[in-house]
Amino acid sequence: MVWFPHAGGATAPLFKQMRALSASPSTLPKLNLWAVRLAGRESRFSEPLETEMESLVDTLAQDLEHQFQPDDELVLVGHSLGALIAYRLASRFLPTDAAASCPRVKGLIVMGSSPPMMWTQNRDWLDWDDDAFADELDRRYGGLPAGLKDHPDALTMFLPIVRADLKLARGVADADHPVLSVPIRAFAGADDQVANRVKMQGWQSLTQAGFSLRVLPGGHFFPLPNLSKILLTAESMLG
């Protein structure tokens, strides 16, 4: 299972939640969890931020090919912006002669994200000054960690990461949207105002191999509190 975080997201919260679940190993699915750490955060803090989706996907595709063997089976899991990235990668690994050396993607799990053809193109707010951008980010996503606004130095470090990540989505609605030959499992937060159940249903048109949608408790950042359910879904897709 390969996890792609939301805009501004890091890997530490995911692994912290995973360790908490490990306290009850009898209920933990038997799968290996990998998480994608994008540039500009955690151990990659000094690396330049990526703002072009296709360039990022090229790099990630190469990384996955180097990390996994052709007979390895993967489920790609993405939250919010991460769902778009995971989908673009899944489309790169569609069965072709050119993809013979790639790991096998068995399924795609998308959470809290409209499908790419419905992704809003009005992103002028990404170029606003920091104060206005932070307010808009908080209004749209509830996406500022508690207390961050009270620490200007930390906010100054955080906002460029989110800004760059969200710029990755510019133009995705106009790109090609291949229909996948693997199943898609979609999750929506019951109180998510960003990608509600109706928007999440739109992912159904991007697969010819089966689709399901499940609503879980929570707002836009529902995945980690519901991690065990998502892990079980990934495990079932791996067979």
Image: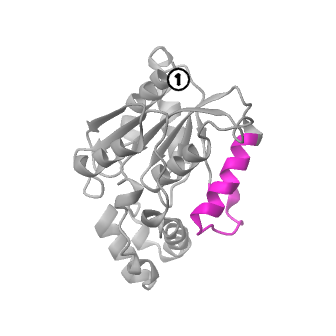
Which quadrant is home to the N terminus?
top right
The residue furthest front is 97
What segment is highlighted magenta in the picture? 38-65
Q: How many marks?
A: 1
- Which percent across, then down, holds residue 107? 50, 33
Q: Is residue 229 left or right of residue 43?
A: left
- Which percent across, then down, holds residue 239? 51, 18
- SS type, badge 1: helix
Closer to the camera, 222 or 171? 171
- Which percent across, then down, holds residue 100? 72, 35
Closer to the camera, 140 or 145? 140
Q: Residue at x 57, y 63 (%)?
A: 53
Q: Amino acid at mark 1?
A: Leu
Q: Residue at x 23, y 49 (%)?
A: 198
Q: Residue 102 lies in magenta, yes or no?
A: no
Q: Is residue 200 left or right of residue 148?
A: left
Closer to the camera, 210 or 136? 210
Q: Which residue is mark 1?
A: 238
Q: Say above or below: 34 vs 136.
A: above
The residue furthest bottom is 129
